[in-house]
Amino acid sequence: MKVFAGSASRFLAQKVARKLAKELSTLEHHVFPDGEKRLRVVDKVVDEDCVVVQSTSTDADKNYMELFFIVDALKRGRAKSITAVIPYLGYQRQDHVFRTGEAASLDVIIKIIEAVGVDKVITFDLHSIRIPELFHIPVAHLSALPLFAEKIRALRSLRDTPRANDTVLVSPDMGGIRRIKILSTMLGNIPYAAIEKDRDLKSGKIEAQRIHGTVKKQAIIVDDMISTGRTIVVAAELLNKKGADEIIVFATHPVFSKDAHILLQNSKVKKVFVTDTIDIPKEKYFSKLEVLSVAETIAEILMHSNKNNPNIS
Ligand code: R5P
């Protein structure tokens, strides 16, 4: 098996390769003065099972194009199979046409992924569990929830005994209830709540309307992604107003658009846990942030595929 890193996921790819006891395979990148890219797979890949790790957060278009070029180069190099690890699948929030006249953007992306020759996709915590059904190739839809459960257990064991049961899991919007229920079950049925959120599509303004469920002293907000950070900030303000004095956030994908890092640092939130599905640029780190790694989860599924499929070496 050969593992390749797209430029958006160098750190994660490196960690995955290490878990698999492999070196990253070599790619040559060249950018022309007008911004066009030329990509070349240096290693021989004939009859090899190849894995490309490339997240497609900001700049999604650029990162997708690079992924497509790498896959095409592998295909032309006669790779036996190509697995695209796309830890954060860009355009996932546009998984259907919301208003007449719009493009079905995710559908376009999926068509290209399949057309260039990807055999299998590995991805994390998709915005909708129906997204894998839009593909015609196998999709391994993994989750960071087990990692979060492990961390929450560790955090709870550090709390004072009288407050040990004073925790509520919170979904910052009604769409996240399924996620929160799964996590609650993993943690022995911790109580959960959900916030009714309104977002104005034009201004992007978010309002947390009301909470369904009981607020406790420790509120753990769980979401699939943090983009502008507004959802979390507004949810934390509401929870704090309703009596939560320790607010902790777990979100799989640190999209961190605009000033999300500054908003989160200055918010009512005590700590923000995210994963490395997206490499976070240095300037977007803040002191409340802690990054958990999904590398082990990816390596395990890659090894597992090997066992199940004797054709994969
Ligand atoms: C929304 O449905 C998602 O689960 C996230 O809550 C949302 O995408 C976060 O966006 P932002 O950080 O911009 O509020």
Image (cartoon, rainbow, N blue to C red):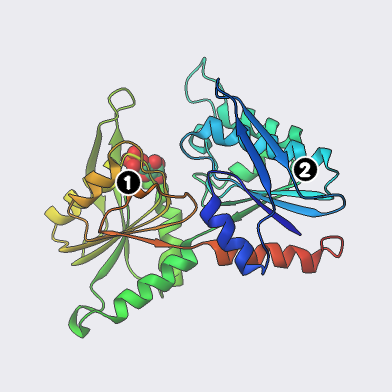
Indicate left or right for 262 with 240 as reference. right
Residue 8 place in picture, x, y as percent: 53, 44
Q: Nearer the viewer, residue 115 or 2?
A: 2
Indicate left or right for 69 with 191 as reference. right
Residue 175 place in picture, x, y as percent: 41, 45
Q: Nearer the viewer, residue 189 or 278?
A: 278
Residue 310 place in picture, x, y as percent: 86, 65
Mark 2 secondary-structure assignment: helix
* Three-letter residue code for mark 2: Leu
Quarter location, residue 131: top right
Q: Which mark is residue 74?
A: 2
Of callouts 1 and 2, the N-terminal one: 2
Residue 26 place in picture, x, y as percent: 68, 50
The answer to whether residue 95 is seen in the rendering is no
Taking the spot 47% from the left edge, 56% from the top edge, the residue there is 276
Label 1: which residue? 283
Quick check: 24 above or below 95? below
Q: Quadrant of ligand 1?
A: top left
Taking the spot 52% from the left edge, 46% from the top edge, the residue there is 88
Q: Nearer the viewer, residue 51 or 222?
A: 51
Instruction: Classify the position of the N terminus by image quarter.
Output: bottom right
Indicate left or right for 136 with 93 as reference. right
* Three-letter residue code for mark 1: Glu
